[in-house]
Amino acid sequence: MLILSAAFAQAQIGGRTTYQFLNLPAGTKQAALGGRVLTGVDYDPTSGIFNPATINPKMDNQLQVNYANYLGDVNYGTAAYAYTWDRHVQTFHVGVTYLDYGTFDGYNEQGVSTGEFGGNEVAISAGYAYNIPFSDIYLGANVKVISSKLEQYTSLGGAIDFGALYYNEDKDIRIALVVRNIGTQFTPYNEVYEKLPLEVALGFSNNMRNLPLRLHVTLENLQQWNIAFSNDANAQTDLDGNVIEDKPGFFNNALRHTVFGVEIFPEQAFQVRLGYNFRRAQELSIQDTRAFSGVSAGFSLKINKMRFSYTHARYTLASHTSLFGVNINLQ
């Protein structure tokens, strides 16, 4: 029985599915708050890319554009727009996520140059949210078309996101449940159909009563409990020369599902955002080295009908990443 159970054991979540870019942060605000926020019921329409239940009338005629030089020549960006039809029909939403991998030098198996090649991926979504009458419950859904080109290989796919949100506006309590990336490849890269990065996540946020703070807690990747793995960089050697492997325990694995975020002055023209992602911190950690990998921070500033935002985060030990965003009120 133990041998059979090991056959079904899984650890790290990367490398098992295609279209991994769908799990990149949707915007500067989400990136600053740890990379996962499911309860953003405000002006920012990019929150609807991750949780369609957050699509709301505050987003009406708001256009948000975000850009990041992810690493090297890899460029990443998102854009979103929302429109409220009326109180009965409520709000519609469109979003775009784009990733350009830059150019690479190609060689065949004999080492002969085959020229440069590139790769890019894009997902276009259309979403809608509905407030159940006489309740604090919101339901939403996104439909996504996904296109990917990696060198000479292309793939086309589709996915659906479902979200539910409880929002008590008087107490500013928000609880969200999201199931993302339910879909398939319509055409695979090379005859082999791959799975999409399905994710189940739960989020909570609340305003502090006497402080200008909004706290966010998100539990990500709930579809798979064991997401911890042994990190060779954290292995230790005892006095006898025996190597002691890094073996994450139950508590360590539980924390890797957790993301914390704090908004300071959440309702003001100037906002400060801080976040901590335990999984990112653990996966990029090196013993006796301060990398600050799980920490992210940012701010936003509103000037007339425009709001500018910036986020600093670290997704690799080789480089830091800056994300820039601008929100335009088109009303």
Image (cartoon, rainbow, N blue to C red):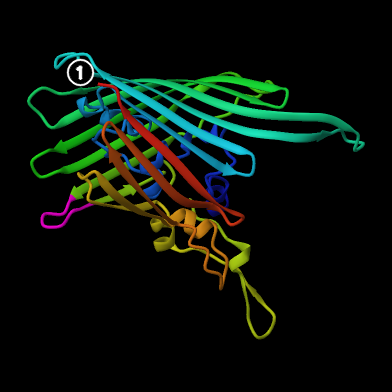
Q: Quadrant of the C terminus?
A: top left
Assign the magenta stretch its main secondary structure: loop
Residue 267 appears left or right of 52: left
- Residue numbers of the magenta segment: 207-214
Residue 210 percent coordinates (x, y): 11, 57
Identified at 34% across, 32% down, the residue is 327
For label 1, the residue is 90
Q: Nearer the viewer, residue 190 or 311?
A: 311
Residue 121 appears left or right of 89: right
Residue 237 appears left or right of 1: right
Residue 218 appears left or right of 144: left
Is residue 204 shown to the viewer in this render? yes
Q: Is residue 208 magenta?
A: yes
Is residue 226 shown to the viewer in this render? no
Give the number of marks. Answer: 1
How dense is the environment of label 1, judged by Cα within 10 Å: few (below 14), some, or many (20 and up)? some
Identified at 55% across, 41% down, the residue is 69
Residue 303 percent coordinates (x, y): 28, 38
The answer to whether residue 37 is above or below residue 292 is above
- Residue lying furthest front: 304
Helix, strand or loop at mark 1: loop
Q: Nearer the viewer, residue 233 or 54?
A: 54
Q: Is residue 171 magenta?
A: no
- The amino acid beneath tag 1 is Gln
The answer to whether residue 204 is above or below residue 288 is above
Residue 207 percent coordinates (x, y): 17, 50
Identified at 15% across, 57% down, the residue is 211
Q: Nearer the viewer, residue 310 or 171?
A: 310
The answer to whether residue 235 is above or below residue 172 is below
